[in-house]
């Protein structure tokens, strides 16, 4: 990365970002700076054998930051770094996942693609460890899938999240909101993707289709928490042959879903859709921009105002 000195000459920055897409005129990202500095400070301690001694709080935080940086930027050594993390963790991975939550929520769109792949990789491992808060991290990732965006990175994230959820389905069933959030997200995306005539998305469409049908047929009771917005989502995909039978069962044979007390579609209409589900339709960045407009821009001046 090249920077301009005050005398007009150019110079090279000390560090090229290994986490983010960064323009030459942008300052260093605070998150990356803290992670990279931690990694530099304890780099010599990140190789086996790992010390089993009890760490101070300061050392524990430093090592967590360093190991996250190593996992995200050194994929060949990621397994070693993750093993080291497992050896030192004393808080159920709470601090480590907190770092990931902040990164995904605040800066996911700027992450380099290899780093995004490592985020999904470590998610799988943290699910195996039943880490506290990993379900929230998956919901944050679902929010990063943008409807109507057919870029390869956006389609990749959609497909990878379905694969993560299916590989860990027994664990997912223990988190009701995550079940509902995944169905809500992929029904919305399937309505977009199904209309796209491209071989590049055929496999993704089949994955989304199979996933949604499986969850709705086998775990419809958990999907009811979505509320009345579920009806709108199902109407959007009712043209798909596999959903036509499901839609008819919903209208004429509700007992097919095996949910005690569910007698007809009006039951769904009486359930208000939580804002937690509605927030899945926009990314955190979009939400931040909308909040700024609604709270800081005088009504009627939106066209002449820009996002922060």
Image: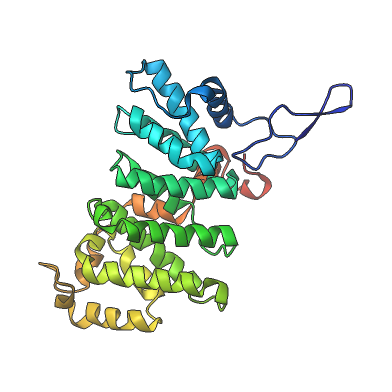
Instruction: Residue at the far left: name it.
Output: 260
On the question of residue 30 being in view, the answer is: yes
Most distant residue in the right direction: 8
The structure residue drawn at horizontal position 37% and vertical position 75%, both measured from the top left corner, is 235
Residue drawn at x 40%, y 81% as measured from the top left: 240
Residue 268 in which image quadrant:
bottom left
Rendered image quadrant of residue 55? top left
Residue sitting at x 74%, y 29%: 13
Provide residue 247's location: percent of width, then percent of height.
29, 79
Q: Quadrant of the N terminus?
A: top right
Way the structure is coloured: rainbow
- Relative side of 39 to 141, left or right: right
Residue at left 58%, top 41%?
298
Corner quadrant of residue 265: bottom left
Q: Is residue 96 left or right of residue 117?
A: left
Query: Observer-nearest residue: 74 or 194?
Result: 74
In the depicted structure, whether residue 178 falls above or below residue 87: below
Asked if 229 appears above or below 93 in the picture, the reply is: below
* Vertical position of residue 274 compared to residue 217: above or below: above
* Left or right of residue 110, residue 134 in this image: left
Residue 171 drawn at (x, y percent): 26, 52
Residue 229 drawn above or below residue 16: below
């Amino acid at each position: 990365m090249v920077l301009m000195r005050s005398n007009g000459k150019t110079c090279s920055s000390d560090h090229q970002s290994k986490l983010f897409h960064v323009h030459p005129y942008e300052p260093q990202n605070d998150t990356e700076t803290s992670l990279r500095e931690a990694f530099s400070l304890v780099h010599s301690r990140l190789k086996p054998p790992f010390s089993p001694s009890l760490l101070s709080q300061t050392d524990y935080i430093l090592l967590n930051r360093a190991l996250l940086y190593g996992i995200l930027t050194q994929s060949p050594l990621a397994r070693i770094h993750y093993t080291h993390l497992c050896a030192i963790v004393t808080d159920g991975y709470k601090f480590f996942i907190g770092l990931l939550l902040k990164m995904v929520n605040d800066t996911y769109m700027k992450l380099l693609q290899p780093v995004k792949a490592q985020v999904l990789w470590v998610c799988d491992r943290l699910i195996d460890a039943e880490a506290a808060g990993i379900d929230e991290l998956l919901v944050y990732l679902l929010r990063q899938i943008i409807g109507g965006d057919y870029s390869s990175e956006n389609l990749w994230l959609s497909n990878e999240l379905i694969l993560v959820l299916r590989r860990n389905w027994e664990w997912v069933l223990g988190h009701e909101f995550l079940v509902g959030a995944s169905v809500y997200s992929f029904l919305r995306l399937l309505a977009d993707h199904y209309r796209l005539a491209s071989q590049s998305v055929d496999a993704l469409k089949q994955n989304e289709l199979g996933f949604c049908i499986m969850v709705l047929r086998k775990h419809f009771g958990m999907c009811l928490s979505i509320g009345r917005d579920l009806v709108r989502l199902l109407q959007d995909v009712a043209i798909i042959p596999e959903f036509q039978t499901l839609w008819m069962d919903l209208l004429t044979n509700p007992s097919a879903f095996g949910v005690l007390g569910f007698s007809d579609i009006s039951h769904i209409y009486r359930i208000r859709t939580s804002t937690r589900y509605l927030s899945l339709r926009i990314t955190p960045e979009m939400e931040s921009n909308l909040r700024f407009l609604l709270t800081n821009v005088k009504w009627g001046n939106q066209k002449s105002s820009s996002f922060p």
